[in-house]
Amino acid sequence: MTLSLRPYQRGAIEALYDYFAGNTGNPLVVMPTGTGKSVVIAGFVREAIAAWSDTRVLVLTHVKELISQNFQALLRAWPDAPAGIYSAGLSRRDIRAQVLFAGIQSIHRHAYQVQRCDLVLIDEAHLLGRGDSGMYRSFLKQLNEINAGLLKVVGFTATPYRLDSGLLHEGKDRLFTDIAYEVPVLDMIRQGYLCPVVPKRTETQLDVAGVGTRGGEFIAKDLEAAVDRDEVTRAAVAEIVRHGEGRGSWLVFCSGVAHARHVRDAIREHGISCETVTGDTPAAERDGILTAFKAGRLRCVTNANVLTTGFDAPGTDLIALLRPTKSVGLYVQMVGRGTRLAEGKEDCLVLDFAGNTARHGPIDMVDGRRKEKSEEAGEAPIKVCPECQTINHASARRCIECDFEFPPPAVKVAPQAASNALLSTQIQAAWCDVTGVSYARHEKPGKPPSLRVTYECGLARHSEWVCFEHTGFPREKACSWWRRRAPQLPAPSSVDEALQHIDALRQPIAIQVRPAGQYTEIAAARFV
């Protein structure tokens, strides 16, 4: 049977070939929830064994549902695959299988039974911290020793960062060394491979003022005590029921076990079928609830800390966040439960009672980097003069040595709508008056030069790059940009030619700016 891969899935596999052809590290493949990591794993495994017939592969993850999903994905692509499962939860221990899908809890003490292994693929790799002595670390260390240090490890995740340690491939004692391939969630939505998530501002908001933090996250018992209040629960549930009319499958994330049950009971009072899944739910009961939910026989499921990863219910078209979190990864994973495509599903409505969208921003703009503290208490922030390399205090407007004038800091655009936007495209651009414009040649290694245009908007500066020497769409866009500013002159063929005619360009009186990741982009310009 031929495995049909989407272009970006094929790209992920090719990126791994390219990586291992020139590197010896442990790469990450970053793909949003719902884009088919299991299909990529299946394709990579099948091709690896086709090329090197004695290759032994171990696919690790943490929950039995993912073990089964990944195993079945390989069998669909390759019915005769020499594959097995090692999982107590699935009652199988096929330790000798050439391709072994295993739960880390079941296999972490049995590296010497696994013996020879060439390739380890870790699904949901964000659950593996760095510098710890957990099950993954000790198991992989033993397995690498058994295989003379030749073991290759690949991580697959939608969120390549952890709350306590930042990006998985950065910092000391990291297991993963690089991101070999990444596909943005917004691209997947635009190309129709994922379903849009739509925000709706809620009247009810959970109050976490005074809730303490430990390890970078809200303290669990204090968080539940703060939000599990009957009047707040009833108000939030009334909004869920009102907005959920006409939507078939509701998934509610709660702040604790008792909270999940209280939300369930309040939803039932409205005549809505609802059950709760927590870590205490017996396996058989949990399987029955989730099967009914996926089949559409159960309208709503509330949960506490168990359905954030490894849960696949494509029909989910309403997500309610009653779980405040400081973890950007948890936030993205929760919203990601609604991005899968399903027949008859146009989008997924997200009701954020927890303030997570305001806390973290749109899911395609999140930054998982750890915010490092200064090593010494009270250490003053600094900046280095680009002219004479003198160290200045961060607040200095001019260099204390050579009088170089530092540019004013960029002001981030944060329109009111951004606090509720789940995707950057949902943020309304803001108009800024232009007080000055400057032009300069911009060089980037390996790329043709471009014209950097910097707009001064009061104390803020915003830049755009006009690519006259590129080809295709960038060149067309540059020509269009030029025609609006100098309709009497043909578009230049080079940056140097453009700089010769700067005086002929019309200066906009205002530009429309919107956030784009850590920067801003110019969406439009207004002329007199």
Image (cartoon, rainbow, N blue to C red):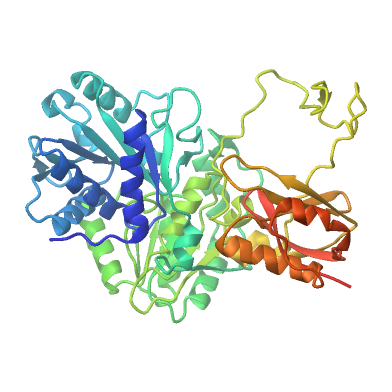
- Quarter of the figure with the C terminus: bottom right
Q: Position of residue 178 (x, y in %)?
A: 43, 35
Who is closer to the viewer here, 517 or 322? 517
Q: Is residue 231 visible?
A: no
Q: Is residue 130 left or right of residue 46?
A: right
Q: Position of residue 109 (x, y in %)?
A: 20, 26
Q: Position of residue 401 (x, y in %)?
A: 90, 21
Q: Is residue 72 visible?
A: yes
- Quarter of the figure with the N terminus: bottom left
Seen at 26% across and 56% down, the residue is: 286
Q: Is residue 110 left or right of residue 369?
A: left
Q: Position of residue 384 (x, y in %)?
A: 78, 26
Seen at 30% across and 74% down, the residue is: 296
Q: Quadrant of residue 372?
A: top right
Q: Is residue 302 left or right of residue 422?
A: left
Residue sitting farthest toward the right: 403
Q: Is residue 524 above or below residue 45?
A: below
Seen at 58% across and 46% down, the residue is: 447
Who is closer to the viewer here, 356 or 129? 129
Q: Is residue 235 above or below residue 153?
A: below
Q: Is residue 526 left or right of residue 335?
A: right
Who is closer to the viewer here, 235 or 466? 466
